Amino acid sequence: MSRKRSWLAHLWHEWAVESRRPIAPAFAHPQPNEWPDDRLTAAWLGHSTVLLNFYGVTILSDPVLFARCGIRIPGLLTIGPKRLTQPALTFRELPPIDLVLLSHAHFDHIDWQTLRQFDSRTQVVTAPQTSDLLDWTKLREIRELRWGERAEVKVSVGTLIVRAIPVNHWGARLRRDVHRGYNGYVLERNGRRVIFSGDTALTNSSAELHDRRPYDLAIFSIGAYEPWIRSHCTPEQAIAMSNAAGAHFIMPMHHQTFKLSSEPFREPIERFATALATAPERIALREIGETFVLENSMQQSLARERA
C-alpha cells in the first residue's frame, strides 16, 4: 500500500505541480543552416541530444525535443519527467538529418514523439535489440551494432564510419526487457574522430580506445550520478575516461534538462569546470544551445549564438 501511495503522490506532483511549472529557455540558439561543411561543428540541444555537422554529414544523437519524455499515450499525453530547460532547437528548426544515433532504449534517449517526426530519408544506427522500438516511425534504414561492429553511413557528400563501443550502463526500456543492448560510439570522417558516450558509469573500456591517433572531441554524460553512480559517471569520471581514450576537447551533456537524480541543477557543470580549471580550453561548451567548432587548424572556437 505504501508503494501505491508513493506512486499516486508522484503522479499528483507531476500533474498538479509540474504541469504548471514554466520551462526555462535554452542559453543560446544555434544556427545550423549557417554552418559550413568543411569542418566539424556541434551544438548541444539538451540532455543527450547533440547536433553535429561532420564535414557535411548531419548527425543527431538521442533526439528528445518535446516537453516531456516517458511513456507516450498517443493523441493524449506523455507520462514522464518534464523538461527543466527548453531544447535549443525545435524539430522544425533542424537541418535535414542524415543519421540518427541512438545509444539505448531508455525513454530519455529513444523518444517516440520525436522519432515519429523523421521520414524514411534519415538513417539510424542503434543498439542491439532496439530496432523494434522504431516500428511506429517512418524510419526504415536502421542498423543495429554490437560492441566492436562498425557501419558505413553513405550520403551524397561521402561516408561516415560509425563504430559501437562498450559502455557501463543497462538497456532495458521496461523492467523485464533486459535483452536490449546499450552502446557508445566512435564517429570518423576526413581523418577526424568523435566519441559519443551515451550513458555510462565509470569503465576501463575507454582506455581500450586509446591508440596512436587522438580523438578530436569526446561527448560524455556528466549528470544523474546521485544516487545512480552505478549507471552514470560523475563529471570527474567523465574527464578521466576522456583522458584515457586520448580525447582533446570534451563536451559535457546529460544535465540541466530533466530531473532524474538528486544532485543540484548546476552541480554537474560546476564540478566539470572545476576539474578542468587548469585546462579550460578543453571544454567544448558548458550551456544548452552553445556551439563548438573544430577549425581545420585544430583551434577551438565557441560560437555563443544567443537567441
Image (cartoon, rainbow, N blue to C red):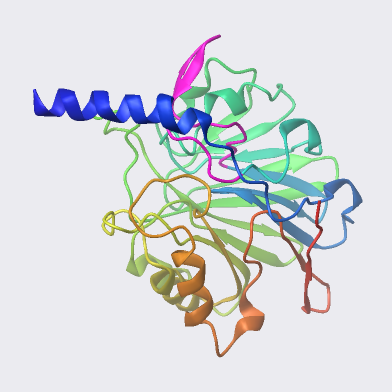
Tell me if I can see residue 245 in this picture: no
Q: Main secondary structure of the magenta part?
A: loop
Q: Quadrant of residue 66?
A: top right
Numbered-mark total = 0
Taking the image as shown, residue 119 lies to the left or right of residue 169, namely right
Front residue of 24/205: it is 24
Residue 302: image location, x then y, percent: 77, 69
Taking the image as shown, residue 276 lies to the left or right of residue 293, namely left
Name the residue rendered at 52%, 30% in the picture: 20
Front residue of 187/280: it is 280
> Is residue 57 inside the magenta stretch?
no
- Residue interval drawn in magenta: 62-85
Residue 292: image location, x then y, percent: 73, 64
Name the residue rendered at 66%, 59% in the picture: 188
Residue 145: image location, x then y, percent: 48, 41
Residue 77 vertical placement versus 10 (above, below): above
Name the residue rendered at 62%, 62% in the picture: 194
The residue positioned farthest toward the bottom in the image shown? 278
Name the residue rendered at 43%, 31% in the picture: 17
Residue 153: image location, x then y, percent: 68, 42
Front residue of 70/170: it is 70
Q: Quadrant of the N terminus?
A: top left
Front residue of 158/1: it is 1
